[in-house]
Image: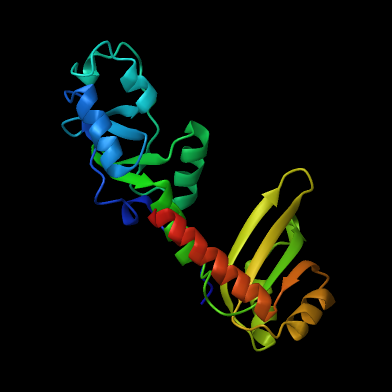
Amino acid sequence: MIKGVSMYAREIVSEGVKPLDHGDSGERAIVRMHEYNVNQLPVTDGEKYIGIINMDEIVALRHLNDPIKDLQIQLKRPYVHEDAHIFEVMKTAVEYNVRVVPVLTADEKYLGLITAESCMRAFATQQSMLDAGGIITLSVPVKDFQLSEIARIVEDNNAAILAYYSHVDAATGLVDVTLKLNTTELSSVIAALERYEYDVDGVYNDEKYDEDMKDNYDALMKYLDV
């Protein structure tokens, strides 16, 4: 079975990070941010999502014992719905330049939030980063791209696709495809793909690459735990 990225916002909501209430004081907001080691937090009014507040905006309060609702600014409102794909979560975080993305239910009630760290963890796990095997990258014209055919070619050569990622390059009209296979013996797969006129752009199949990948993953996880 081919495993692509199929994770949704409701599945990676961070349980331990609570939002601020719009009646909370600036001082309480700062304390909570230090507690969670973040500089941004969602603000809610009951189940209603108000927006994201950051440390600089809190400092702008005339007195830190004043409530957040006294801020005379319009808070940014980045969010995704609970059925949003992990890619949409990432896109929202980048567009709004935030490290926490609030998640709302279909009827616009605040459900929770996704931190950049939890999103990265989920993506890394879903993509089988730690599974042993080789990686092949391909370029395929959009009109010719059929994942089922690529999978058949791989399977006909005694291999299986553990995970894949594809990206359409609008400028070239090509689909850039990355395949993670269950084997490092890739020569027969590569030869077969080339016989079917696929352009193989890159191959990563040695033990050193697997070790580096695991070392980098472990380093990332250690950093995220700081």
Residue at x 36% of width, y 49% of height? 83
Expressed as whole percent of the image width and height from the top left, the position of residue 146 reads 67, 65
Expressed as whole percent of the image width and height from the top left, the position of residue 203 reads 74, 72
Q: Nearer the viewer, residue 8 or 57?
A: 57
**Quadrant of the rendered structure where residue 140 is?**
bottom right
Expressed as whole percent of the image width and height from the top left, the position of residue 48 reads 22, 30
Q: Nearer the viewer, residue 96 or 9?
A: 96
Residue at x 69% of width, y 87% of height? 157
| Image: 170 above or below 26 | below
**Quadrant of the rendered structure where residue 216 is?**
bottom right
- Left or right relative to 165: residue 188: right
Residue at the far bottom: name it.
158
| Image: 168 above or below 203 | above
| Image: 54 above or below 195 | above
Q: Nearer the viewer, residue 39 or 174?
A: 39
**Residue 6, visible in the rendered structure:** no
Residue at x 70% of width, y 79% of height? 206
Count of marks overlaid on the render: 0
- Left or right relative to 10: residue 20: left
